[in-house]
Amino acid sequence: MSNKAATAIRRGGVRLRSSLGSGHSSLNLIVSEMSSLRQRLKDVVSAEQRVSRSQISWGDSEKSPALQDVLHHMNDITALWIETQNEYIAAMKEYKRVYEHILESEKKLDQARKDLATYEEKEKKYEKELWKGSKDPDRATHKKEYYRKYKELAMAEVSGQEKETEAVKLMSIKAGLLDHSRAWMTFGKKCCMFAEVQKELALLVPDINPQTDTAPSYTGTRQSIDIVKELGRRLTDMVPSYQASAGSRVLSPPSFPPPPKPLPTYQEQEYDSFDSFEEN
């Protein structure tokens, strides 16, 4: 199956689950695609590891000391490069959590609205029963007032959850983008460092004498070691962006008190509060 076909099937599955569930297909798709993106980045890292091992194997089979030395140190550089990519992949996971947090807040709002609709429906049911002339008006009145009270509580819950959800969206996105931008900039700076080091190693390989078609003796062993050590030192001085942001976050999603106890369901109300009204 082609990658395009697999992607189409995955997106269709996300939309189908959303249509059958609570909705929010765009948010679900963002989370799904970011998970797919992280996996593809991991696949790239695995491919780079295989290439590096093959380069060493090929270099060792060659007679040139320059090829052997430079390719071995390129393997050391690749190991550091893979570590850098894993740091960025970890930052991508944190960014994905931003949308998971928003989705969770949206689902809480959905549930609050569902509760409100339930209590409104029950209140109207007993209003209609009283209007038609209930056989037990006291019981119908009690139930109508009971559901009216919980409807008012549910309205307050919806209002509060709507404000919380909007705050979560704004602050989560702002904090997430700031954190991801730091990770992205750090990754870009390290990319430049690796490119510079690879160029330095390449320049250690001696040029072929065009008249003799031979190369002078390789003298870069000490320099290649120093180049890799210096890269390691420079990378160590740069704290991974996803760790730094966790300790120096400028903005973070707001912290709200725990939600109140969920409103009772219709069945619980019937059992807990209306036993005395049930007909024999």
Image: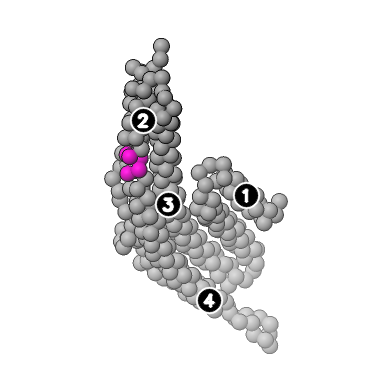
Q: Amino acid at mark 3?
A: Ile
Q: CA distance from mark 1 to mark 4?
A: 45 Å
Closer-to-camera residue (198/63) = 198
Report the magenta stretch's main SS. Answer: helix
Tell us which disc is closer to us: 4 or 2.
2
Tell us which disc is closer to us: 2 or 3.
2
Tell us which disc is closer to us: 1 or 4.
1
- Magenta residues, as a range? 152-156
State the residue position of label 4: 199
Q: Quadrant of residue 137?
A: top left
- Residue 150 in the figure: left or right of residue 201: left
Q: CA distance from mark 3 to mark 4?
A: 44 Å
Q: Position of residue 172 (x, y in %)?
A: 38, 57
Q: Amino acid at mark 4?
A: Lys
Q: CA distance from mark 3 to mark 1?
A: 22 Å
Q: Amino acid at mark 1?
A: Gly
Q: Position of residue 270 (x, y in %)?
A: 39, 23
Q: Amino acid at mark 2?
A: Lys
Q: Quadrant of residue 207?
A: bottom right
- Residue 134 in the figure: left or right of residue 160: right
Q: Secondary structure at mark 1?
A: helix
Contact check, label 4 and label 2, Cβ < 8 Å: no
State the residue position of label 1: 12
State the residue position of label 3: 102
- Residue 75 in the figure: left or right of residue 174: right
**Which mark is on residue 139?**
none
Contact check, label 1 and label 2, Cβ < 8 Å: no
State the residue position of label 2: 144
Work out whether mark 4 precedes mark 2 in sequence or the reverse, and give the earlier one.
2
Number of other residues with Cα within 10 Å of mark 4, as a class: few under 14, some 14 to 19, many 20 or more: few
